[in-house]
Amino acid sequence: MKVALVYDRLNKWGGAERVLLAFHKLFPQATWYTSLWNPHSANFSANWDVCASIINKLPFIRNHHDKIPFLMPFIFESYDFSFYDLVISISSEAAKAVITKPGTVHLNYCLTPTRYLYSHQNIYLTNPLFRYIAQPLRQWDLVAATRPDEMISISTCVKKRIKKYYNRDSTIIFPPVDVSKFTAAVTPHRHTFDYYLLVSRLVSYKNIASVIRVFANMPDQNLVIIGTGSQEASLRRLATPNIYFIKSVIDKELVSYYSQAKALIHPAVEDFGLVMAEAQAAGTPVIAQNKGGALDIVQDGVTGLLYDGSKEGSLDSAIKLFAKESYSRQACRQNAKRFDIHIWEQQIIERIKQYVQS
């Protein structure tokens, strides 16, 4: 069976890109089709068989996909998939729009319907260019969403968005976590539990500043922040001596940070939130907003604590409440088994078989 994999752009590293690694492991010989590819900023893909668009020949645009949303229809509709038996698009934007022949199965692993056209459009409406192109892009996107034979959602909230915006049903298959990597690293004698942990790209919508402000008023509690991003400098200026920044770590070090933390704090509302599932796999409770993917991942009061982010002081109260309670690290690890990569692989293969054998 000849397989093609399609992704919006290969130019960064984040939670979604961990999903790409899982698909690459499942189909190591598959060619990847994408709009932009930067093998330096997305070095995990440096040795993959990648077919990028002609626009990618302009080096200055490779990390600026936000500048060319109006080109996405032309890019993804231009690819020829007539020689493939199976096409899997992984998308939060335009990759689902690829056109396949009747005999080719097209499955879409939907990270979310396009944010800037639907759920988060108000954030982007301040851009005059976006206001001009939003409506025609939305009309095109609605057509594009009819093309996959099946849409697979990564969480309950994404499933609801797919139904709301595209009027399509979808099967939930949670993103994969290599649970064994996290549980194998658990060494009780090393546990210090003297800090809270935050793992995230340091960008505005991740709400990192809100956590820093809380810990600035808790000088007896330590916070370790792992990540980089456009807000790093401003966030460092907000930080007090009990807040520590670490730019990047290898996976083995990240597992150690997870397993030795009191809790992972996750202030952003995510479509899923892989770092929360990873923390659970390491036996670490999670403190997160009671929205988005956290509702699928965290068992409130058992493997972590969910708080109402719309209320002033709610995170501060949640941390203080967390400190008074006890959470079973074994329960966290048990909870994370639902997201194990082997279960994910079985579920993806089962969805493929539903079409290939029919």
Image (cartoon, rainbow, N blue to C red):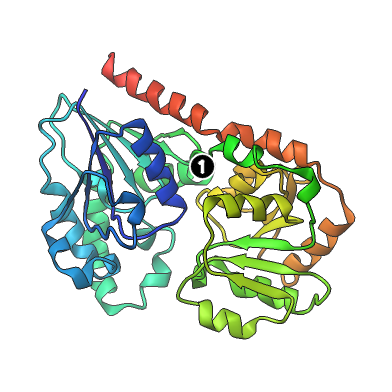
**Residue with the mark numbered 1:** 155
Q: Position of residue 346 (x, y in %)?
A: 45, 24
Q: In the figure, is residue 54 to the left or right of 85?
A: left
Residue type (three-letter) at the residue carrying disc 1: Ser
Residues 132 and 266: in front is 266
Report crowding for label 1: few under 14, some 14 to 19, many 20 or more residues within 10 A (C-alpha).
many
**Does residue 250 lie above or below 105 as drawn?**
below
Residue 304 at least partly seen: yes
* Residue drawn at the location 60% of the way across and 45% of the way down: 277
Total labels drawn:
1
**Does residue 55 lie above or below 149 as drawn?**
below
Q: In the figure, is residue 178 to the left or right of 264?
A: left
Q: Position of residue 102 (x, y in %)?
A: 14, 27
Which residue is situated farthest in the bottom direction here? Answer: 237
Q: Looking at the figure, which quarter contains the C terminus? A: top left
Which residue is situated farthest in the right direction here? Answer: 324
Q: Where is residue 171 in the image (x, y as percent from the top left)?
A: 44, 32
Q: In the figure, is residue 328 to the left or right of 81?
A: right
Quarter of the image where one finds residue 82: top left
**Does residue 72 lie above or below 173 as drawn?**
below
Quarter of the image where one finds residue 120: bottom left
Q: Where is residue 118 in the image (x, y as percent from the top left)?
A: 38, 58
Residue 292 at least partly seen: no
Quarter of the image where one finds residue 169: top left
Q: In the figure, is residue 259 to the left or right of 252?
A: right
Q: Looking at the figure, which quarter contains the N terminus? A: top left
